[in-house]
Amino acid sequence: MNLIFILTVMALFIGLTWYIITPLLSGNMNSPITVNKHDLNRKKTLLLRQIKELDMDHHIGNISDEDYAINRRLLKREISEIISEIKNVS
């Protein structure tokens, strides 16, 4: 094989490897995420349904009072965060 061909292939391989690995090592893993109002409203609706199901499960006795209170509080907190995001997107 020709020495120039081997050096060219090695240079391309090193350059490609550097191009792929550099963003991983830079530490900046923040990628811009676009969130639209429709997706947030959909997620809010799903969470409201989960609260409704949780209420029904608690009412029929499938969930203890402690688990019910914890899960309901977490779901309500998540809905509050989504509502504030919806206000910021508008």
Image: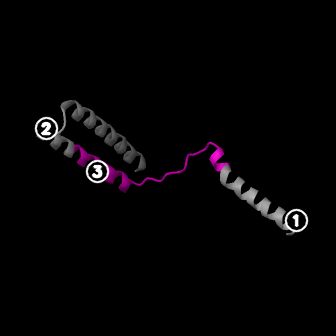
Farthest residue in the left direction? 60
Q: Residue at x 55, y 50 (%)?
A: 31
Name the residue that disc number 3 marks: 46
Q: Nearer the viewer, residue 89 or 45?
A: 45
Mark 3 or mark 1, earlier in chain: 1
Name the residue that disc number 1 marks: 3
The amino acid sitting under disc 2 is Gly
Q: Position of residue 74 (x, y in %)?
A: 31, 36
Q: Is residue 65 left or right of residue 19?
A: left
Tag 2–tag 1 contact (CB < 8 Å): no
Name the residue that disc number 2 marks: 61
Tag 3–tag 2 contact (CB < 8 Å): no
Q: Is residue 66 left or right of residue 89?
A: left
Q: Main secondary structure of the magenta part?
A: helix
Crowd class of label 1 (few under 14; some 14 to 19; many from 20; radius 10 Å)? few
Q: Residue at x 36, y 51 (%)?
A: 40
Q: Which residues are magenta?
A: 22-51
Colour style of the rendered protein structure: one colour
Rendered position, 59 above or below 11: above
The amino acid sitting under disc 3 is Leu
Q: Quadrant of the N terminus?
A: bottom right
